[in-house]
Image (cartoon, rainbow, N blue to C red):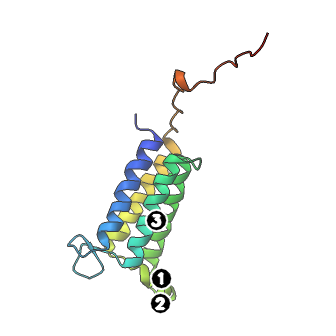
Amino acid sequence: MIEARTAAITAGVVIGVTGAIALFGNPLADGSGEALFHIRIWHALVLIVLGLLLLAGAFTALGSRSALRIVGLAFAAMFVLGVLGDGQWLALLDFISNSAADEWLNGILAVLLLGAGVFLREDEPAAPRPESLPRKPRRIGW
């Protein structure tokens, strides 16, 4: 069974690399209107930060499940703002412009990441190796 740490590492790498790839022009993710996913530079930077947050959660005390939930909520917010962002009142958020494909991908990622953060179990800490266990102190003297 997949555990939360594995999911956080996998999602973190994929999301972070996607953001890094989007910084350079390509037919899948680009700031031009010709790419499948319309990702501007700020959106690419947000993806890199979210990927790093997932990786940090997998390797720090933040915890994988918490990181998955936080990033899932961020993707849910991007989905909602992307769907509602066609109105003039959200014109300030145009710097994270999305295409319809990207909006739905954000929604799918939100559901998957939130589900992983809720339903996957946290990894058990690895058992310490025998050589790393504390030794009994030696008596000096009598």
Q: Is residue 111 left or right of residue 21?
A: right
Q: State the residue lying farthest toward the right.
A: 142
Q: State yes or no: discs 1 and 2 in contact (Cβ < 8 Å).
A: no
Three-letter amino acid code at the position of disc 3: Val
| Crowdedness near tag 1: few (<14), some (14–19) or many (≥20) residues, C-alpha within 10 Å | few
Q: Which residue is painted at 45% across and 80% down in the image? A: 85
Secondary element at tag 1: helix
Q: Earlier in the sequence, mark 1 or mark 2?
A: 2
Q: Position of residue 52 (x, y in %)?
A: 46, 59
**Cα gap from disc 3 to disc 1, whole angstroms:** 18 Å
| Disc 2 element | helix
**Residue 142 percent across, percent down from the top left:** 79, 9
Residue at x 74% of width, y 15% of height: 139
* Residue 99 position by quadrant: bottom left
- Frontmost of labels 1 and 2 is 1
The residue pinned by badge 1 equals 93
Q: Say above or below: 16 vs 125.
A: below
Query: Which secondary structure lies at badge 3?
Result: helix
Q: Which residue is mark 2?
A: 88
Give the numbered dot on residue 49: 3
Depicted 52 relative to depicted 25: above or below: above
